[in-house]
Amino acid sequence: MTGVPLSYIFRNLWVRKLTTLLTAGGMALVVFVFAAVLMLAAGLEKTLVQTGSYDNVVVIRRSAQTEIQSGIDRQQAALIAARPEIAVDSDGGSAVSKEVVVLVVMPKRGTNKPSNVTIRGLSPRGISLRPQVHISAGRMFRPGSAEVVAGSRIARGFQGARIGETLTLAGKTWTVVGTFDAEGSGFASELWGDVDQMMQAFRRSGYSSVIFKLGSSADFDKVRGALEDDQRLTIEAQRETLFYAKQSEMMSSFLSVLGSILSTIFSIGAIIGAMITMYAAVASRTAEIGTLRALGFKRTNILAAFLIESLLLSLVGGVIGLGLASFLQFYTVSTMNWQTFAELAFTFSMNSRVVIEALLFSLFMGLAGGFLPAIRAARLDIVEALRSV
Amino acid sequence: MWSFLLRLVLRNCLRHPLRTSLTVLGIVVAITAFGLLRTTIDAWYAGAEASSASRLVVRNKNSLTFSLPLYYRARIEQLEGVKSVSYADWFGGIYIAPKNFFPRFAVEPRSYFELYPEFVLPPEQMKAFVLDRRGAIVGRKTAEKYGFKIGDQIPIIGDIFPGNWSFVLRGIYHGADSKTDESQFFLQWDNLNETMKKLAPDHANEVGIFLIALERPEDAPLIAQRVDKLFASSRAQTLTETEKAFQLSFVAMTEAILTVIQIVSFLIIVIIMAVMANTMAMTARERRGEYATLKAIGFNDSHVVALIAGESLLISLSAGAVGIWLLYPLAEWVGHRFGSIFPIFLVAPRTPLLAAAMALLIGVVAAIAPAWRASTLKVAEGFRGIG
């Protein structure tokens, strides 16, 4: 004997439209929240993964956690820049950039609320170390001038950061001459200008960090050992990818904790909703169940039928919730990263992992909510059940 | 008549004990979660809430990561209306591992604690701190969490100020009231400055912020302007604001996260509303015959509506009450567990009121559709289902 036909299960959901809608709607909202948190975490990860290049090395002062906290004086920077492992660019120069990074409070566009923006002073060589950065409008700043280019997120989100506008930083006026796209990387949340101009304006006598590209990727351990063992240097060298991943460890773990707490609490509500619906379905169909059993369907068939009904219900909720969540991709979240103390913008990002996890989560809710009612249905006695007709 | 209806409502609630208890459980969870999320938002604002309007904070106009020269202190002190000036530096650092976070400041001991009477410290401990350049003071909560005792050596690895630091605990402060942050750690600014003189003379005699105590709090805007004007053409320009505005600017930086928590706190109410509405819709559907009977024997529409609304409200409000009752011990647990993120995690007086309003809303909304259907139900139609 095969199982209860699917059309029977489907029609049961169809006939009680309001109940089905309310139960699936509750689940859809839960899946929406679940997916939203996953998408936020995925978006953050995507931004950070794309910020670093595997072959680039970031050198900062030992035990400094960020470029802002770090300081490398000119002598140390010169020693680092002289390493033979550094790649040679096509023009014969070595691919190394001594940079200064500062945080400046700027008012947000629209709300006028202040936020910390990362300002990076670098050389043309530094720009070529970030192949993901492209000028999308205007042009690159001219070395030695009081010109800056704004990452796309900064240009959009902060006052005075659009092309042609001027900014006052450290008492000096700077003209925004271009906007750059950074392929979703964290550089889009930065403002770039000439390194010497920045050092002068912000009265920095040393650099914040030194970034270089490895001639051969395999040389990393060698160059790190050489730099960190050098008695004249008090620095730490990290691959750029790892460096940026560590910058947002706190934010990632915050998102995952928030996500798991919220999904747990929310799913309790949705599971209860499903349970109520399924218990009611069993109670109102006692006679039908009796009839099905009398026709020869086994207890396991009944169990399966009710479980499938519950799973179907939750799947509908899951699909609706994911559909709603997909609209979030148009939104950008811009907030302060506690570790760097600077503004970081990232988008909700939907990928196959988010879709699979959200659907599995909704099916789990359906299973958890439908299990006990399905058991009750399966354990009904044929004679008793038929008597209720 | 109405007492009869009330009894009927009570009986109705108990007809499906499983369904009722599941619904109650759902609402309890939702209301408690709602209360906790609101408390989280309040905790975000706790720093601003506890700050005083009679204190001003002076910082570098560029951003907090830039410092100000120490000699500004003497010039600010000369301004009329300024009672006293203190200064502090965010020290940062790592205690064993980055996850052991508690705020660490380098302060000028006497003037700082005069400015913050809410940090209560026994006089002999204060004296010991002032006398020991390597001394430190820590709040009660942090001391309890890490088991610090007076006389203990506390090692800190510097991140902003490099080096392996070690401090001797000289005192443990208590908060004057429940809103005072008891998690902070203070070291002597002189200790920091001596080291900076040796290691990084460029950064010596520089402070993070100045704190101004005012003679009259109402002078705050005027004095803030005067301070900024005083240094308008100096190498380090200043930005002066009340301590409250200063704290709120931190909150504003993470506003996006706050907005998310706010939205989510209402979403959970919407979700449970759907669950409750479903319960009431099913209940009313099953009792169409009864409503028809009641109408047939002379009860009118308002009685039927009262019957449904009464049941819905009874369930939602009693569940809401349980949820609010559970909120307090849970908030205490969360405050204990996440003390390093939220030093102050207290249920605000308006939170239970808001939660009760949400429970009321759940009950009302869930009753609308079934009450409408039952009141417009024609008696003959209602009996049709009965076989």
Image (cartoon, helix red, strand yellow):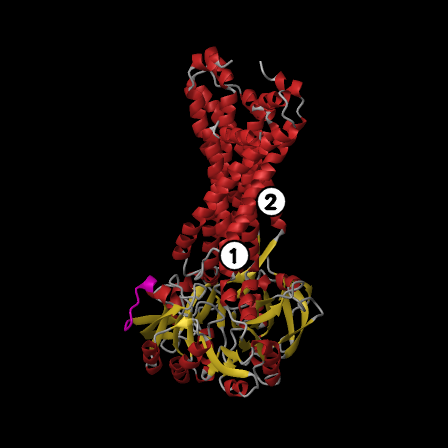
Say what secondary structure mark 2 lies in: helix
Residue at mark 1: B41
Between residues B362 and B167, which one lies in front from this camera angle? B362
Asked where in the image residue A167 lies, by quadrant, the reply is bottom right
Q: Is residue B269 above or below residue B233?
A: above
Main secondary structure along the magenta-highlighted residues: loop
Where is residue B64 shown, x and y percent of the image? 52, 73
At label 1, the amino acid type is Ile
Q: Chain of mark 2?
A: A
Q: Is residue A55 magenta?
A: no
Task: Confirm whether residue B53 shows in the render.
Answer: yes
Q: Chain of mark 1?
A: B
Instruction: Determine the secondary structure under disc 1.
Output: helix
Q: Is residue B365 left or right of residue B156?
A: right
Distance CA(mark 2)–CA(mark 1): 27 Å
Q: Residue at x 32, y 71 (%)?
A: B155
Quadrant in which residue A16 is drawn: top right
Where in the figure is residue B224, as x and y percent of width and height?
A: 59, 78
Same-chain check, marks 2 and 1: no
Q: Which percent across, then down, holds residue B342?
A: 45, 60
Mark 1 surroundings within 10 Å by alpha-carbon count, few (fewer than 14), some (14 through 19), many (20 or more) = some
Name the residue rendered at 53%, 33% in the picture: A314
Span shown in magenta: B144-152
Rendered image: mark on residue A326:
2
Task: Give the percent coordinates (x, y) of residue B339.
Answer: 41, 59
Q: Residue furthest right?
A: A164
Residue type for callout 2: Ser
Measured along the vertical axis of the image, is residue B7 above or below residue A161? above
Q: Does residue A18 sit above or below B156 in this rendering?
A: above
Residue B229 shown left or right of residue A46 in the figure? right
In this rendering, would A239 be left or right of B4? Answer: left
The one of A56 and A20 positioned closer to us in this rendering: A20
